[in-house]
Amino acid sequence: MQVTTADKRATFRKMHDSGCFILPNPFDVGSAKALQHLGFKALASSSAGFAWTIGKADNHVTVEDVCQHLAALCSAVDIPVNADFEGGFAVEPDRVGENVERGVRTGVAGLSIEDSTGDKDKPIYDRALAIERIKAARKAIGDSGTLLVGRCEAYLWGVADLNLVIDRLTAYADAGADCLYAPGLKSREDIAAVVKAVHPKPFNLLIGGSGLSLQEAADLGVRRISVGGSLARVAWGGFMRAAKEMAEKGTFAELGSGYSGGELNKMFS
């Protein structure tokens, strides 16, 4: 039986009701299919991971690029896909809303909106504007069933102010965000404080390379864990080590550490 977009959205919402799950981030159709094959129940796109596949830096892709990528991911797998929709690819709330409408049409089950500006001197939007951007995204999503994730990027931009993060996330929840996310949180105390502040709405924790286990995050009340561009960086790590060895030494030892071609063909057949 074919899984519809409505089915995926309903499943994704239910996954946020209790417990804690891993939401890994593929960077292309192949990695998305592999993650589904491994048994993951939902995926999230990675803005950085995707950007690198088309030879661009993170935050330098267009809304057209991203929507094509999201549509490809959603059609390739039978499980829900949450979109890393960056900052909505616009500043003004009405334009954010227009772009979110485009994002929803790709078939995603969830979609996140950030409050970072890209300006090092003023890294996050003024509070009032940031809230209006979330409200515009909520309105654009309408009754589609797509989950809206409100993201506060303060910690990623060096603004390590927990009170600010909690204030932003609770405001985004009031503005219509279904799930809250503050990448960059590290300590158990900070994570627990944010989980408590946004309750009963679910909180997404970013883990990359080290940190809490799934069980430890669950014990803190985290509802879902994503890994951002980490899987893409792992893939690029193997590629660059092998390519550098060939370029610099003229040897090929690193090629021996690759995943089995036979196993890949078996997985994708």
Image: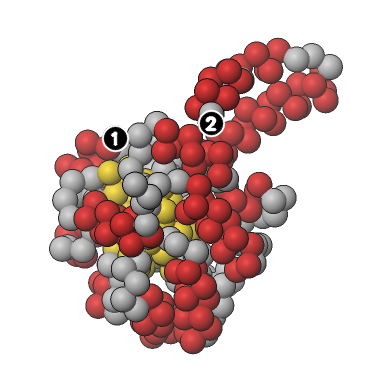
The answer to which of 54 and 196 lies nearer the viewer is 54
Determine if residue 134 is in view: no
Q: Residue at x 34, y 55 (%)?
A: 8
Whether residue 93 sits left or right of residue 162 in the image: it is: right
Which secondary structure lies at badge 1?
loop
The answer to which of 119 and 29 lies nearer the viewer is 29
Whether residue 217 sits left or right of residue 83 in the image: it is: left
Mark 1 neighbour class, 10 Å CA radius: few under 14, some 14 to 19, many 20 or more: few
**Three-letter code for the amino acid on which mark 1 is drawn:** Ser
Q: Residue at x 27, y 59 (%)?
A: 10
Query: Which mark, residue 213?
Result: 1
Determine if residue 99 is in view: yes
Return the residue at label 2: 268
Seen in the picture, residue 83 relative to 213 is either above or below; the reply is: below
Lower sequence index among marks 1 and 2? 1
Image coordinates for residue 180, horizontal then vertical, percent: 31, 63
Image coordinates for residue 56, horizontal then vertical, percent: 70, 54
Image coordinates for residue 98, horizontal then vertical, percent: 51, 81
Q: Estimate the spatial distance between the alpha carbons at disc 1 and disc 2, rounded to whole Å.
A: 29 Å
Say if mark 1 contacts mark 2, CB within 8 Å: no
Q: Residue at x 82, y 17 (%)?
A: 249
Q: Residue at x 40, y 31 (%)?
A: 38
Whether residue 66 sits left or right of residue 182 in the image: it is: right
Whether residue 37 sits left or right of residue 217 in the image: it is: right
**Three-letter code for the amino acid on which mark 2 is drawn:** Phe
